[in-house]
Image: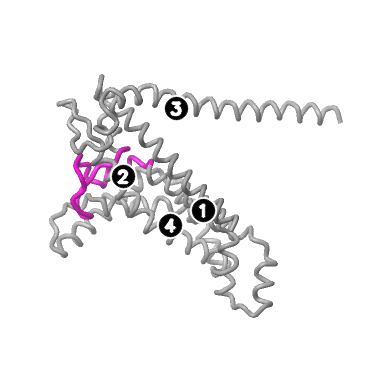
Amino acid sequence: MKQNNLLENVMKYVFMFAAFTSILALLAICYFIFARGIPFMADYGLGNFLFGDTWQPSQEVFGLAPMLVGSLYVTLIAFVLGVPTGIFTAMFMAYYCPPKLHKILKPATNLMSGIPSIVFGYFGLQVLVPAIRSLARALGFASNGMSIATAGIVLAIMILPTIITMSESSLRAVPKTYYQASVGLGADHDRTSYSIMMPAARSGIYSSVILGIGRAVGETMAVVMVAGNQAMFPQGLFLGARTMTANIILEMAYATGTHQSALIATGAVLFVIILIINAIFAYVKRTGVNN
């Protein structure tokens, strides 16, 4: 008994140490980003930085608006394509998939979540870029294939494992008595699955969407490889753009002084945007569960 109590006390402090370490790491990241980012935005002007339409570091001009819009477009495409696909795939795997097929799809989905982002980028570069280029030219648009559409599709594929895995787990966690009660009242399988089981699992589904969109907003390497990376306002789905993450990674290696501070400020803006997205989804999740 004493040994068990000793072990419990030791593990309690180990877990407490791990929790405090995570908190300290987060605070250190916040301090590093905002200690350099906020003074720059204060000196340069928050409005000039966020809404400026020109990014030319050589002339000390740092307008972030083109990258903000580029990130918004790419993330929106990933959301529109990836979220419904992921949720309906989870529904299929939870309530419609034959057991033999599920034994193949489940490991394949888990494998996708472990693929490095640069591999997704290479897939987009070799497969999607030529396909988008051919499609755009067939529709009469001049495009080299590196575009907002390509980046959005790559991100949609990348967020699928997160959404599918978490949504399926949430759907399977719904008590089977819900299904039995609905069927007992005369509802068929489809109506029970979509009208009873899916709403009951919406808390976990919302969480999967939050994590998926968070990954899409913060993704870098895959986007750099297929987005075109022009530091200007997007001119169309089949033309290139630059996201905030791509802007940081492309220029941080040689940036110094004010230019470096501007890139750190870009990271601060990205950090705040992710916090806002998480807060919005958390609010929607909480109100949805309460209703």
Q: Which residue lies furthest to the top in this view?
A: 257
Residue 14 x, y percent position in the rendering:
66, 27
Q: Is residue 286 magenta?
A: no
Magenta-colored span:
218-245
Give the left or right position of residue 1, taking residue 147 as reference: right
Distance from disc 3 to disc 4, alpha carbons, whole Å, reads 29 Å
In the image, which disc is placed on residue 83? 4
Name the residue located 71 percent from the left edge and 29 percent from the top edge. 12
Instruction: Identify the residue under disc 1.
Output: 206
Q: How crowded is mark 2: few (under 14 residues within 10 Å), some or many (20 or more)?
A: many
Residue 148 x, y percent position in the rendering:
26, 51
Any part of residue 250 in sight: no
Q: What residue type is labelled 1?
A: Tyr
In the image, which disc is placed on residue 71? 2
At mark 2, the secondary structure is helix
Distance from disc 2 to disc 4, alpha carbons, whole Å, reads 17 Å
Q: What residue type is labelled 2?
A: Ser
Residue 239 x, y percent position in the rendering:
19, 51
Upstream in sequence: badge 2 or badge 4 = 2
Name the residue located 65 percent from the left edge and 73 percent from the top edge. 182
Distance from disc 1 to disc 4, alpha carbons, whole Å, reads 10 Å
Question: As rendered, which of 174 and 136 lies closer to the eye?
Answer: 174
Q: Which amino acid does label 3 sit on?
A: Cys
Quadrant location of the N terminus in the rendered image: top right
Instruction: Identify the residue under disc 3.
Output: 30
Quadrant location of the C terminus in the rendered image: bottom right
Q: Determine contact: label 1, label 3, CB under 8 Å.
A: no
Upstream in sequence: badge 1 or badge 2 = 2
At mark 3, the secondary structure is helix
